[in-house]
Amino acid sequence: MSAEIPSREVARRAFAAEFNDASYTFRESDDERAPIYLLLPTGERANRVFVVGTLTEKENIGEESEYWRGRVVDPTGTFFAYAGQYQPEAAATLREIEPPAYVAIVGKPRTYEPEDGDGVLVSIQPESVSVVDASTRDRWVVETAERTLDRIEAFDPETNEYAAMAEERYDLPAETYRDTVVAALESLEEGDAEPEPEIEA
Amino acid sequence: MSDLDTTAAEIHAQFADRLDGLTEDDVRERLDTLVNEYRVPLDEARRSVRSTYLDEAGMDRDELGGGGDNETMLVGDVDEDEQWIDVRVTVADLWEPRSDSISQVGLVGDESGTIKFVAFTTSELPELEEDKSYALSNVVTDEYQGNYSIKLNRTTGITELDEEIEVGDDSTTVEGALVDIQSGSGLIKRCPEEDCTRVLQNGRCSEHGEGEGEFDLRIKGVLDDGDEVHELIFDREATEALTGIGIEQAKEMAMDALDTTVVADEMREKVLGTYYRVTGPTLGRYVLANETEELTGAVDAEPTLIRARSL
């Protein structure tokens, strides 16, 4: 309808294992306001992500002003979310939630390369943090599995520019994330099963 | 006939019974002067000549009509402002008029979908009945923020049809997580001017300026399935159904906090991150949430697991 209003960026779905493997960011134009994308190893650009997991810990690591760090765990790993004075709503929610709790986070991928470290740290700068229930979390795991499989199936460096970029930038074959998906889904099935009787050794 | 001749005939037909002695030649001459001497585009010339005759006849543009030979259009094809058209439609929905100047407002539809219609009290038209089919002649199209509607006026002809015009289903169903509630959501104020429902920004209507405003509830939300985003609008009823917060409660919350934004904040807290299936008609780039279902309960991971293992 209008070329002036850029279309809203899709919130990508990726498991923590894949998200944390990403390190390369890029812009698609020279405009300094152009969106920054994180390149997912399965060959997709992400300017926004949606994750659901268990907030296991939160800590105010700010010195002069509040700066909250939350650890959000999915079946494959841990997302780190950082919210400070420029994300007042997300920061307020993190301040109030008592872990453990299921949370949904919409946010922007951010990368940081510590001077003394070895490698790039990937985190989420939340636009919103909200408390959700276990069924929402399970639905996210299945949905994220589906979207990840979509990307693996579309991973063709000949025809897909982000697949080509991933092949060039990362030494991480897309198929390895198939195993991540299987493990994540199996963890749901285990959760559904009747608890095994404990056997005394 | 040339375009200019056709236009002259149209204009003549519109004014023949109001301006004694007006001939088609008079009209053609005026058009010809503008178009061929002054290089005015034909559309603009048509407008200008019409205005002249409207003045002479002491008529409002509303009374003009399209000259009786309008195009019969499907409502889904309406994509231009201020066109005089005919439609054959069924009344799909009647809403409560928000002002005394409006006699009827609602949705009419044909095979292509539905469109909003407005009839004004001053037009003194017979009332349309829900679920009945009508031929409406001489209605005018209107556009607001990319959304089209039709306005009935005093020249509109209303003929009830024996046949039933089927209303096409233009509703769409979208699923995903609600990832954003945008500004302009929650407890809002609408312009109280007649036939204006614009949302006030800082107490101002973009059309009518400063005003007291009438409270309403609305959510502009974004549903995202990781592949596509859909922008949604929840009206007052749908907002209450989604959030459990009604207009009276919202007003109390705002009053207690001396701030209306607490309402949207509370709504965000309740619904963000939750999965929904939403069904409703599309209006411009929005899906109007008529039915909303929270996706909850157990999810079957088995099909996805089979897909992953066979990859």
Image: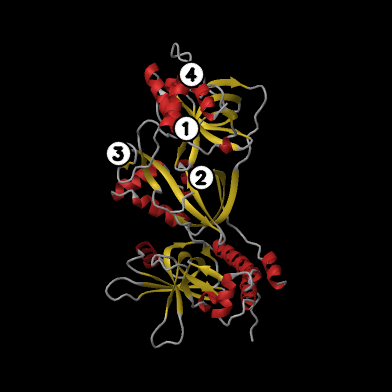
- Residue type indicated by callout 3: Gly
Q: CA distance from mark 1 to mark 4?
A: 16 Å
- Residue type indicated by callout 1: Leu
Answer with mark 2 or mark 4, whichever residue precedes in sequence.
Answer: 4
Which residue is under mark 1?
A: B42
Answer with mark 4 or mark 3, whichever residue precedes in sequence.
Answer: 4
Q: Name the quadrant containing residue B162.
A: top right
Residue B63: x and y in percent read: 44, 21
Where disc 2 sits, the SS reads loop
Total residue callouts: 4
Answer with mark 1 or mark 2, whichever residue precedes in sequence.
Answer: 1
Give residue B25's mark: 4
Closer to the camera in the image, B111 or A121:
B111
Which residue is under mark 3?
A: B209
Residue A95: x and y in percent read: 37, 67
Q: Are marks 1 and 2 on the same chain?
A: yes
Where disc 4 sits, the SS reads helix
- Residue type indicated by callout 2: Gly
Q: Nearer the viewer, mark 1 or mark 3?
A: 1
